Amino acid sequence: MAQKSVLILGGGIAGIQSAIDLANMGNRVYLVEKKPSIGGRMAQLDKTFPTNDCAMCILAPKMIECANHENITLLTYSEVLEVEGDPGRFKVKVLKKARYVEEDKCVGCGECAEKCPTKVEDEFNAGLGQRKAIYKYFPQAVPSTYVIDPEHCRIFKGKKCGICQKTCKARAINYEQKDQELTLEVGAVIMATGFDLYDVRPLTEYGWGTIKNVLTAMQFERMICASGPTHGHLKRPSDGKEPKNLAFIQCVGSRDVRHKRYCSAVCCMHATKEAVLAHEHYPALSSTIFFMDMRAVGKGFQDYIQRAKTEYAVEYIRARPGRITENEASGNPVIHFEDTTTRQLMSREYDMVILSQALVPSESNAAVAEKIGVGLDDFGFVSPSEDPLNPFATTRGGIVACGFCQSPMDVPDSVVRASAAASKVAEILASNGSERA
Amino acid sequence: METALERNCAESPDLRSEIRTLMDANHLNLCLECGKCSAVCPMVNFYGEYVHTRCTRSVVERLCFDPGGISDEALWYCWACKECTFFCPSGVDFQNFMTAFRELMVAHGHRDHAHFCSVCGAYMMPKKQRDYLETTMNLNGNSELLWECPNCKKGKYLNVLYKLAGGNGKSSHR
Amino acid sequence: MSKAIRVGVFVCHCGSNIGGIVNVPDVVEYAKTLPWVEWAEGNLYTCSEDGLSSIRNKIDELHLNRVVVASCTPRTHETLFRKNCQRAGLNKYLFEFVNLREHCSWVHMGKSDEATLKAKDLVRMGVAKVSLLKPQEDLATEVTRSTLVLGGGVSGLTAALALANQGYLVEVVEKEDELGGLLRFVNRVFPTHRSSAELLNPLIDAVLAHRNIRVHLGSELVEVKGFVGNFSAVIRENGGSRDLNVGTIIVAVGAQAHKPEGAFGYGRFENVMTQLDFETQCGRYDRFKRVVMINCVGARDEERSYCGRFCCIVALKNALLVKEANPQAEVTILQRDVMAVGRLYEDYYRRALEKGVRFVRYRKAEPPRVEGAGTRAEKVRVLHTLMGKEIELDADLVLLTTPLVPAEDNAALSRMMKIPLGMDGFFLEAHQKLRPVEFPADGIFVAGCARYPAEITESIGQALAAAAKAAIPMARGKVVSEAFVAEVDPGLCSACGRCVSVCPFGAVDWAEVPAPDRKKRSVARVNPAECKGCGLCASSCLSGAIRLSGFTDEQIFAMIATQR
């Protein structure tokens, strides 16, 4: 008899969706997420195209549903160690890392973080802000339990502190907490490990990291997001001034043999969205998007682009810029490009430039795949299935994959595939372990 | 007005297929016309103006549709500095192509725009490039830098070295 | 009820969505002054774990028996907050949602003072209403464990098989005389170039052989009644009709190929055809020397604004097949953007470039011109936008790349099943981001090209997703529907029939009740399981006989009365 339980690796929108579907069907679900909170990349977005829904507003109910569902066990700040056995009867080992904060005591009030003396670069805010050594991954984190970062916390570096423990009224801080190893029995596994952002520093021609007012798209998302480090205000990193014009450069690291050969699928749309949002925040602001092909293929996407052009002051220039230099006096980046349609060589100054960085399979994906015996392709995506009728199969029976870890895709596609993976798993469990085409 | 290249191609069909072979070997067919090459090309700085028909992207585009459509000028502008090849996101090796293409043209008798070594007669660089370097470096035609090819220069230095080392002063180089 | 009303009011900042325009602390202080309010507080995000536990704690601590949350939209968050009340032991229908975002902050940006005043009005109304709410229970109905799948193409067949493998019974209804849908006419599939039969035949065989699946060929849906868990459908089959009882329905009726009559010589020149025509007719790929393809024919234009999603890839496929069969062939694709999205298709595009397929960008405003003599096209002229000059291409074959267009029956099906169509003519899903294979009406799902052009992998994904969604109520065995439904008072009903015709869900029907003179008379009756609580019937009733729970006249008048 197959275990009527499932292990899902990855707590982004894909992992969350398949967890909810499988739990609603009556199966027990273990949702493992390496970060201290579920939510994934969607939690970092401000709004989502093409409806311009607030990302957190549509994600939070699903996160809460996961947390409250009687059939779902959330294992956050956790990693999978191994998967042994056969489909229908897997034995899984999961490492639950110590938060040094007791989950059942912490109410998420945040007073510890207020008093903590150590500041650390904030990963969730794409390096734009700072968090403390004791922190909540983001304001709407699920679970809302705080976590101590042992790499930066003074106590773990042998220095004197203990302020958070003294401050905590719920007495939730426990520096002695240990990692826990859990053994679970599941019938199937879903891989939904998502993506990371490509480091665009090597593309020195664009100057990210040296020219202050050149940002990545994720940094821009965090900036324009109301719950981000600038509370939704656009502020140039060099002088804090409000930009009057923006430039977006597409395919930075994507569609490039020197970096990533493939297309990251969502950048054409997210750049348009960001330009639209910027105009909504600042009606006098206009944007230019430098692109190669405007890949707006989904439902409603073409209309979205049209509206961006006619209502939101977005200009599209078909060109791949050669270089970005800096006007040292003003701090304005200057883009040097050949406008391929007018065949003119031009240089244009902008207040701020946003690079649509390539999106790559999660860095931890390679290690996870190796641990669980799933084959990856040379980019690190899950190897495409051999069976055209089952696009979610991996090289190991009983393990299916969905979402960005298979191939670049947007939220609606990830959600569809997450439910599809749930369906496949339901078949595996019903058939007592043997997968069907 | 017919370009020299058009005339050549009309006269010898082999030339067209040789050009095609060079294009395939250097992956010109992978060009997505993004314009990054033209944007990083330093030609504009040297010649003070941008003429689209001479720029990298234009040459590639025209070659794909009609090898004869390249102007005489366009062949001899490129400095083969390799910036375009370095940055091309599709993997087009324009610099290598241009170098080989010129050799092909010289072999077919296109010598007017090319500058050759005054000692051995080998092709050195486009005349435009020599003129530009001459004026900016204030050389006034006397420097061996511009009039002797690297091979000949090397031969000269080797002879000097042999002499210093106590040999009979003539290297077998060249 | 003699127990005192004790209301808790929770006002959300929603980050800065509300708090940036409405003075939330001010509203909180105001709420404290309202009758029955025992507690009022502001939250940064009431929907977060912190906010929800705060509500539960206060219900517990202060014995609250009514909760008002003034935040965003009930459309996304009502269920969340109701369940939260339930968790704290409070009947979930003793909760009222006040929308301070869509109804206040978002529509009055830049008018902080007025917005705050309005927010106070809204909260006052919410408190007045919540005091009149009564505890209620949801309604549970049994679910039939079978599914009706409309359409026997790759989507329908995949969904059918997925459900059948889980033990559910499936009825597949296909209007043609054979299964397979559009894929029957496709020769090879991208990017493997294997024949479509290799993919389709095993699928069809598996469906026909499965003991849980019944296939109805040459059949069409004629009528559907009922609601999730209990649909009764009538299909026309073999000249007769048949009744089917199912629990869920999956709409997988696909799309149809576009015939661009008159465009680019289509219909006039025999060697101008669509990509699909080419696949169906042409057999051998090595017969052609000069192939010109024109992309975006009938897509991304005035007539049809959408992008066909995968037609670029179809063009690449046929270009590669021609080139591989005859390397000397000159193949040129005239395009406006190459939509080779993602990992697989970008490499496929590169493969075409490596094989020597040429691409010419043309502008929408200056389309290519196909010229010919008699019945054959001979040349294509196009302005090569990026080169800036017109080029002339010889052609012995001109292929037009067209998008899939909505199936003709969509409008009729939409009316029959009360499922919406989008502006583009395809079926419109419940929410584009988070509910892409569901309809607003529970129990009905959509997959494949019926929703929007989708290629094989996507169609299979959507079909499996729809199967997963359909499996949920069937696995549970019952559906629970909301208590806020309409009810007809037979004593007041004049049997005019307005409500019966106006209900978008077909939830109001006729029922016989005893009449005073021993006869029977017909009155309207609402089926609480089908009723969605939209209120159309209640507002159209001239006799005032219909009462909508949760929005009674008494409650609405109380809200209005607070405005003085």
Image (cartoon, coloured by chain):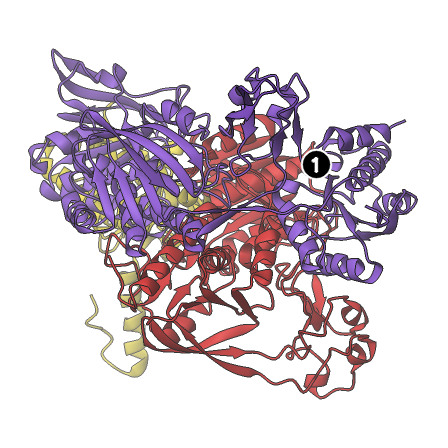
Chain colours: A red, B yellow, C purple
Q: Give x and y (percent) for residue C31.
A: 87, 44
At horizontal 19% and vertical 38% (from top left) the residue drawn is C179
Residue toward you, A189 or C525:
C525
Q: Count numbered badges in the picture.
A: 1
Q: Is residue A216 visible?
A: no
Which quadrant of the figure contains the C terminus of chain C? top right
- The residue lying at 28 percent from left, 67 percent from top is A395
Position of residue A289 measured from the top left corner of the image (x, y, whole percent): 53, 38
Disc 1: which chain? A
> Residue A284 location, x and y as percent?
70, 32
Crowd rating for badge 1 (residues with CA inside 10 Å; few <14, some 14–19, many 20+): some
Query: Circle 1 — which element?
Result: loop
Residue furthest to the top: C374
Q: Position of residue A180 (x, y in %)?
A: 55, 83
Find disc 1 in the rendering and name its residue: A282
Is residue A184 found left or right of C15 in the rendered image?
A: left
Q: Is residue A25 left or right of residue A315?
A: left
Q: Name which residue type carries label 1.
A: Tyr
Is residue C485 visible in the rendered image? The answer is yes
Q: A48 or C370, which is in the foreground?
A: A48
Image quadrant in which you'd find residue C537: top right
- Residue at the image point whose x is 17% and y is 13% from the top: C268
Residue A16 lies, with reference to residue C262, above or below; the image says below
Up-down: is A205 above or below C356? Answer: below
Front residue (pair A357, A62): A62
Q: Quadrant of the N terminus of chain C?
A: top right
In the rendered image, the residue lying farthest to the right is C33
In this image, A308 relative to B103: left or right?
Answer: right
